[in-house]
Image (cartoon, rainbow, N blue to C red):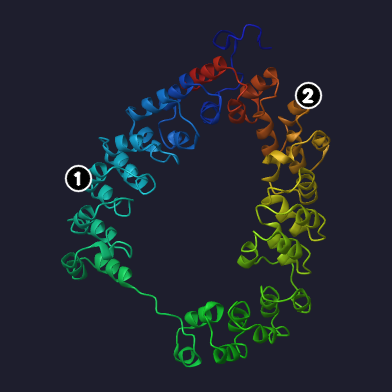
Amino acid sequence: MLDLSAHQPAAVWRPLSDPPPGREWLAGLAANPAAPPEVLRRLLDDTAEGDGAGWLARRPELPDGVLEAALGHPDWRVRAALAERPALDPAVLTALAADRDRRVRRAAASAAHRVPLPESVLAALAADRDPDTRRRVPGAPGLPVELLVRLAQDGSPPVRAAAVAANSWCRLPPRVRTALRADRDPAVRAAVQRALRVERPLPVTLAGYIAESDPVRRERTAAGAALERALGEWLVLDDDPRIRRAAAGNPRLPTDLALALAADPDAAVRLAVSLRPDLTEEQRSAVDHGASEVSAELPWVAERAGDPAELVRLARSGHPLVRRAVAALRHLPGEAVAVLAEDPEPSVRLALAVHCADAPGELLRSVYAELLGPSSLPGLERFAAPGLARWAERPEPALRLAALRDPELAPEVLARLAEDPDASVARAAAGDPRLPLEVLLGLLESGARPGAAAANPALPVGFMLRLLDLAAGA
């Protein structure tokens, strides 16, 4: 038994596993939101090798002392990992752009596409002795035209090719463009051709459509072009069901021509007709679309998000895919939520639970219990509720996992879930801060999920430091 009374881990705690799971402990501590700066600074050294420093990019916040230590770390992988942080301070990226190791500068040049840098820093990267760093600079926001010209005239072909793009070509002086067209390197000339490629307008007349030989452009015409009526009449009689299906979904096809496809022998064509925004509910319900489990993008439903009365009307549509599109909107009027929460189609209720911020917690729990997922639902704040502990006895792992969202979950139930045969349940329970300390220490020593236990924010700092010592000696 462990003597926990004094909370002196270095003196009284010894792991039972042989060898100790050092790598898993380190990964868990790196993800532990309660890990203090002293632990994080130790982790910089202990996780530098391989991909271990990736935790620097994943932690939402880094204390200043840890950030400074990472910037000055002797291992280039630690410094380069900082460039991968989503919310990167420009001052940090500026320091990385001047790093002594070209691999760090490359990472900084890539990050400059999402973090604006001063012109002087961009100039330094554009003049870097490493061509792989220079080729990453074009496309950075705020890149002055003189630096773009310098890169377009670079001695390295990959750098010149990277400087040529549709949005940069017009910024280059005529003399530079002339030289690039005649560049000796085929990759540069290919980049020029891509930059100069201009999409021809789609045909909108019958004569233009007949003259079009590209089948892809023909289908795109049917799907989205502003069709002249004669062309629309031609398309609804096309022998190819793909063309008829594309035309049926084209909102610019006159309604009467679209309704001519309502009895089409191809079910996909009929479905496309049934989902048009210009149909009345009576017209929509008259189409035998024969499909409710397929998915369909309906941008026109989202365009009505600001019209509460229209959303309520669409929530009562006889078409399940229309109702599902309404349910997937972020915010809905209360009446629409109430209607959709009672929808007979599980996919509609699922869309409401997953996407709508106005969906009640009771709906989230009922949908989750019915469908045993998706896994994102228990993480929503509205999902948690007293009484979920009853699911801890269920045979379905998804329900046992959701039992952890009971704010009144008993410690002994939580301890049992931490030893659950299902890995996802055991991992989640091992990381729950309500877990009794004695149980948590047992999981660190001999449990199946030592990494999840090390990530538990309730783990005392002394034990975190002891894990680092043991991992270092493993």
Which residue bears the numbered disc 1? Answer: 129
In the rendered view, would you say 82 is above or below 115?
Answer: above
Which quadrant holds the N terminus?
top right
Q: Residue at x 67, y 34 (%)?
A: 428
Q: Residue at x 67, y 52 (%)?
A: 331
Comparing 333 with 130, the one in front is 333
Q: Residue under label 2, please give it.
A: 412
Up/down of 18 relative to 348, above or below:
above
Residue 453 in the image: state x and y as whole percent: 62, 27
Q: Is residue 316 above or below residue 355?
A: below
- State whether residue 293 appears in this view: no
Residue 413 vs residue 215: left or right? Answer: right
Disc ID at residue 418: none
Q: What x and y, as percent, mark residue 462?
A: 55, 14
Q: Earlier in the sequence, mark 1 or mark 2?
A: 1
Where is residue 347? Give x, y as percent.
74, 59
Which element type, helix, strand or loop, lies under badge 2?
A: helix
Query: Would you say 50 lies left or right of 452 here?
Result: left
Name the image quarter holding residue 420.
top right
- Give the residue type that dot 1 points to: Arg
Quarter of image, res 51:
top left
Q: Amino acid at mark 2?
A: Glu
Residue at the spot 71% in from the left edge and 59% down from the top edge: 308
Q: Is residue 228 left or right of residue 104?
A: right
Few, some or many C-alpha atoms within 10 Å of disc 2 (few <14, some 14-19, many ≥20)? few
Characterize the local packing of mark 1: few (<14), some (14-19) or many (20 or more) Cα atoms within 10 angstroms: few
- Asked if residue 271 can be seen in this view, the reply is yes
207, 270: nearer the viewer: 207
